[in-house]
Amino acid sequence: MSDRDDAVRVSFGTAVYNDDGDQLGTIRGFDEHGFYVTTEEGIQALSGEHLTAGAPGEAELMWRCWSCGEMGDIEEIPETCPACGAPKEDIYYWQED
C-alpha cells in the first residue's frame, strides 16, 4: 500500500502500479465491486459487448453516477453527470437487471 494519504482520482485508461512502481496495467472499467484492469495493450474500456453473465436481455450494462445515482446508456458515457454535474471520474459501470 502507498504511504500517501491524499485521494487519487482515476478514470478509464489510468495506469495502475504496484508498490515497487511497476505498471500492472490500465483501468478499463468500473462497477460496484471496484475497477477492472487490463494487462494487454490495445484492450478498450468495458462495453456492452463484454457482458458474459446470463442470457441476452437478462441484464443491461449502464453507467451510473456515484454522487447522485443517475444512470444512462453505456455507449454514451457523459463527460459530467447530466443530473448533478459530477465529473466523469464519478461515473462507473453498472449492471442493471
Image (cartoon, rainbow, N blue to C red):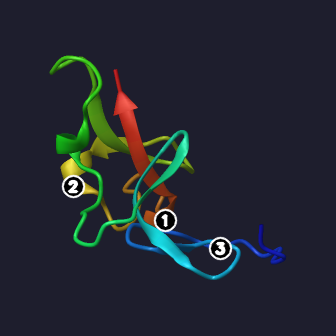
Q: Which residue is mark 1?
A: 89
The residue under label 3 is which amino acid type? Answer: Val
Circle 3 SS class: loop
Question: Closer to the camera: disc 3 or disc 2?
Answer: 3
Quarter containing the N terminus: bottom right
Distance Cα–Cα, label 1 vs label 3: 10 Å
How crowded is the residue under tag 3: few (<14 C-alpha within 10 Å), some, or many (20+)? few
Q: Is residue 64 above or below residue 42?
A: above
Q: Indicate the secondary structure of the residue bearing disc 1.
A: helix
Amino acid under label 2? Glu
> Between 76 and 51, which is closer to the camera in this rendering?
51
Q: Earlier in the sequence, mark 2 or mark 1?
A: 2
* SS for callout 2: helix
Q: Are marks 2 and 1 in contact (CB under 8 Å)?
A: no
**On the picture, is 50 further left or further right than 85?**
left
Is 97 located above or below residue 75 in the figure?
Answer: above
As shown in the figure, which amino acid type bears the numbered disc 1?
A: Glu
Residue 12 occupies quadrant: bottom left
Q: Mark 1 or mark 3: which is in front?
A: 3
- Badge 1: few (under 14), some or many (20 or more) residues near its Cα, within 10 Å? some
What residue is drawn where x is 49% and y is 41%?
69
Residue 79 appears at what percent x and percent y?
34, 68
- Across and down, in percent, residue 83 comes to 42, 51
**Which of 92 and 39 lies nearest the eye of the viewer?**
39
Cα separation, mark 2 vs mark 1, equals 15 Å
Q: Residues within 10 Å of mark 2 (few under 14, many from 20)?
A: few
Which residue bears the numbered disc 3? 8
Residue 26: % across, % down: 42, 69
The extreme bottom residue here reads 21
For the point 44% across and 69% down, the residue is 25
- The residue singled out by tag 2 in the image is 76
